[in-house]
Image (cartoon, helix red, strand yellow):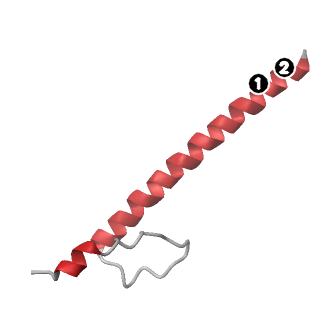
């Protein structure tokens, strides 16, 4: 049974560095990293789409 003080500790935030050595990570840790990176890719793609829409609207406005 874990010590009560272990339950109160904040969980370490998962982070990943591109090119990081993966040999010490377990399969579940790798799965967590993959999920984290997929979320980040989705966030980047959404922001890119938003910026392209803004640029397209500006281009349309100034071409008239």
The alpha-carbon separation of the residues under discs 1 and 2 comes to 6 Å
Residue at position x 90%, y 20% from top? 63
| Left or right, residue 50 beside residue 10 | right
- Looking at the image, is 55 positioned above or below residue 37? above
Residue on which disc 2 sits: 61
Residue pictured at 73% horizontal, 31% vertical: 54
* Mark 1 surroundings: few (<14), some (14-19) or many (≥20) residues within 10 A: few
Q: What element carries label 1?
A: helix
Give the vertical position of 27 relative to 3 (above or below). Answer: above
Q: Is residue 50 left or right of residue 62?
A: left
| Residue 26 in picture, x, y percent from top left | 30, 77
Q: Is residue 21 above or below residue 62?
A: below
Q: In which quarter of the image is the C terminus?
A: top right
Q: Please give the name of the residue rendered at 22% of the width and 73% of the height, measured from the top-left corner.
A: 7
Question: For this rendering, which residue is in front, 42 or 15?
Answer: 15
At 54% from the left edge and 47% from the top edge, which residue is drawn?
Answer: 43
Q: Do the residues labelled 1 and 2 touch (CB within 8 Å)?
A: yes
Residue 47 at x, y = what percent?
Answer: 62, 42
Q: Residue 57 carries which label?
A: 1
């Amino acid at each position: 049974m874990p010590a009560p003080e272990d339950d109160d500790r904040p969980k370490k935030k998962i982070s990943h560095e591109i090119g990081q050595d993966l040999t010490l990570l377990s399969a579940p840790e790798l799965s967590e990293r993959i999920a984290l990176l997929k979320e980040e890719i989705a966030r980047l793609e959404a922001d890119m789409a938003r910026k392209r829409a803004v640029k397209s609207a500006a281009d349309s406005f100034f071409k008239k």
